[in-house]
Image (cartoon, helix red, strand yellow):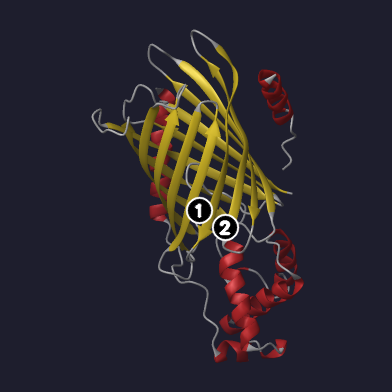
């Protein structure tokens, strides 16, 4: 019954037309300090392709459908209706539901007028044998046509049959985006991750991802694409990944 | 592996482009002063309206794009632009008028 319901959800969401603005994203792996306009509603469709090379070469595509609503001029609510993925490995391939989540972003200061624009972010995620809590500090500064953004993220994950597997992660991300024309921006994104398996730092897992991004906006929609490569050599992490976010105002 | 190298190369090109750009204006939009209000003389707007216009300009317009200078477009172009963009930013008519009043005042002052 549960399986049928999941299949039905996957079918509905997969066949949802990509037609669906509270704001434009200049980055795909970073968040920006400004929140959505009050009472604005936007649908975003995320797709992330990940390629792992090496002996266990595999491909995976993660999908996300997010509704963003501007509650006030400072507070934004986001609902991840369903995260699901397609995996193509040597042993098996197929689709599976991953999780659903809710996020809140509160803007503290303005990136144009104040010395630095700050927002705080909180997210709760629940899925199949998965609970995840994430908090983020979002810093941003606009220098004319240049946007600089920094995110510091702390993440706690409980997963497995009785949620006995635990993992923590601290991530810092830096992005720069330059507005080449009113419709087009291009820049760079960099992620630096510290992974704490079972809340310990024994394995000293450090991951670095870097790559360019481009964002195009027109009317009530936008599309932003980032391609990241991993200069570090962590086996369990993708060597190359591309994320696309398409957003449209409802 | 080729994709990995291509991605790192593209990132370095982006940094070089940003670094070579000489047109970045670091200054935020002008503050509302009595001089600015006088520059907006023809519009018959008060300081409070201009302040609200500036506040909305620097907070709501950046949800989608960076802030253009007032001189980027002509005085006759701005009403249409603000009307169109104001819809996307969910601005009420009175808020759009305030943003337009501020931009036109800055435009008049910069002439």
Give the answer, above or below, for where A4 lies relative to B10: above
Residue lying at the far left in this picture: please name it.
A202
State the image quarter where residue A169 is shown.
top left
Quick check: B48 above or below A80? below
Q: Which residue is depicted at the point 41% across and 38% down?
A: A156
- Image coords of residue A240 (percent x, y): 44, 27
- Estimate the x, y position of residue A116 in percent, counting from the top left: 41, 64
For residue A35, the mark is: 2
Note whether residue B68 is visible.
Answer: no
Reading the image, the residue beneath label 1 is A32
Above or below, A110 relative to A151: below
Residue at 47 percent across and 22 percent down: it is: A51
- The subunit letter for the residue under badge 1 reads A
The extreme top residue here reads: A91
Q: Which callout, 1 or 2, points to the residue nearer the camera? A: 2
Question: Where, by quadrant of the figure, is residue A115 drawn?
Answer: bottom left
What is the secondary structure assignment of the residue under circle 2?
Answer: loop
Q: Residue B3: in sight, yes or no?
A: yes
Residue A91 placement, left or right of B8: right
Q: Are marks 1 and 2 on the same chain?
A: yes
CA gap, disc 1 to disc 2? 8 Å
Q: Are marks 1 and 2 in contact (CB under 8 Å)?
A: no
Which residue appears at 41% of the width and 18% of the height?
A53
| Mark 1 crowd level (few <14, some 14–19, many ≥20, 10 Å Cα) | many
Name the image quarter holding the N terminus of chain A: top right
Question: What percent of the width, then of the height, locates residue A11?
Answer: 72, 24
Relative to the observer, which residue lies in front, A188 or B111?
A188
């Amino acid at each position: 019954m549960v399986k049928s319901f999941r299949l039905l959800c996957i079918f509905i969401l997969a066949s949802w037309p990509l037609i669906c603005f509270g704001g434009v994203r200049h980055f795909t792996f970073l968040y920006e300090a400004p929140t959505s306009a009050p009472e604005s509603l936007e649908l975003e469709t995320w797709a992330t392709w990940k390629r792992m090379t090496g002996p266990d070469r595999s491909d995976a595509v993660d999908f996300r459908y997010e509704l963003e609503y501007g509650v006030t001029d400072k507070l934004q609510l986001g609902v991840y209706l369903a995260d699901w993925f397609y995996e193509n490995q040597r042993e098996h391939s197929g689709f599976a539901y991953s999780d659903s989540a809710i996020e809140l972003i509160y803007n503290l200061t303005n990136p144009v007028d104040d010395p630095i624009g700050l927002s705080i972010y909180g997210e709760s995620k629940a899925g199949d044998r998965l609970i995840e809590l994430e908090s983020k500090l979002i810093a941003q500064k606009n220098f004319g046509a240049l946007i600089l953004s920094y995110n510091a993220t702390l993440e706690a994950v409980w997963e497995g049959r009785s949620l006995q597997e635990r993992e923590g992660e601290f991530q810092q991300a830096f992005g720069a985006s330059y507005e080449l024309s009113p419709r087009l921006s291009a820049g760079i994104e960099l992620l630096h991750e510290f992974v704490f398996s079972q809340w310990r730092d024994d394995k000293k897992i450090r991951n670095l991802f870097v790559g360019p991004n481009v964002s195009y906006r027109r009317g009530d929609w936008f599309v932003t694409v980032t391609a990241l490569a991993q200069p570090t050599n962590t086996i369990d992490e993708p060597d190359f990944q591309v994320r696309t976010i398409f957003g449209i105002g409802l | 592996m080729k994709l990995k190298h291509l991605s790192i190369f593209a990132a370095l090109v982006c940094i070089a482009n940003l670094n070579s750009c000489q047109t970045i204006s670091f200054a935020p939009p002008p503050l509302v002063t009595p001089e600015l209000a006088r520059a907006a003389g023809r519009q018959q707007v008060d300081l409070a309206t201009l302040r609200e216009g500036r506040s909305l300009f620097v907070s709501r317009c950046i949800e989608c794009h960076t802030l253009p200078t007032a001189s980027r477009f002509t005085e006759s172009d701005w009403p249409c632009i603000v009307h169109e963009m104001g819809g996307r930013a969910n601005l009420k008519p009175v808020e759009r008028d305030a943003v337009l009043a501020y931009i036109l005042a800055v435009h008049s002052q910069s002439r």
